[in-house]
Image (spheres, rainbow, N blue to C red):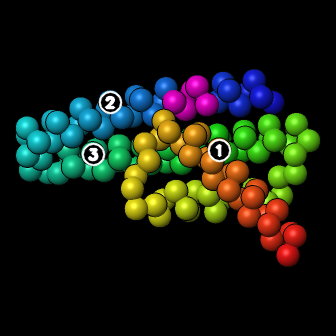
Amino acid sequence: QILLKNETIKRLRKDIKTYKRMYESNSQNKNKTNVNMNGNSENRYDELLSQLQILKQKYFYSVAVGMKLQMQYSGEKVHFFNVDDLYTELQELPEQIPWFEWPKWLDSAVQRQKRDYELNKQL
């Protein structure tokens, strides 16, 4: 399971880099050409941007679920770990965290959720 998770993460990272290059290339071309009369460049740009967002979301969930599986495999309780809540929290942060720093952010967020759960359990 962990090997499959690592392979998925590597593939998603590669896909994100590819889409990012395509997005940046399209963005530069958009600035140079000022969009075609029929709007094809703008439609392609929006499509790439949408695909990039979906890919980033898949990457986030893959990393988070991988962390959850790893914690569960090592005997830790994981019922406090809510991936949807963490994704929402990440999206609502005032400062944008680059996707390549999400694993580090996730680790600290999970530790915070775990601490909060333990504190609430004691009350």
Confirm whether the magenta stretch covers residue 10: yes
Q: Residues within 10 Å of mark 2 (few under 14, many from 20)?
A: few
Q: Could you tell me residue 19's position as x and y percent? A: 39, 34
Q: Quadrant of the C terminus?
A: bottom right
Left of 55 or right of it: where is 85? Answer: right
Q: Are marks 2 and 1 in contact (CB under 8 Å)?
A: no
Write the start and end of the magenta stretch as one range: 9-13
Of residue 68 and residue 11, the one placed in the foreground of this image is 68
- The residue that mark 1 highlights is 107
How many tags in the picture? 3
Q: Nearer the viewer, mark 1 or mark 3?
A: 1
User: Which numbered disc, 2 or 1, marks the residue that appears first in the sequence?
Assistant: 2
Q: Residues within 10 Å of mark 3 (few under 14, many from 20)?
A: many
Q: Are marks 2 and 3 in contact (CB under 8 Å)?
A: no
**Looking at the image, residue 25 lies above or below residue 44:** above
Q: What amino acid is labelled 3 in the image?
A: Tyr
- The residue that mark 2 highlights is 21
- The residue that mark 3 highlights is 45
Say which quarter of the image contains residue 30: top left
- Tell me how far mark 2 sits from mark 1, CA to CA: 28 Å
Confirm whether the magenta stretch covers residue 93: no
Say which quarter of the image contains residue 66: top right
Q: What amino acid is labelled 2 in the image?
A: Arg
- Tell me how far mark 1 sits from mark 3, CA to CA: 33 Å
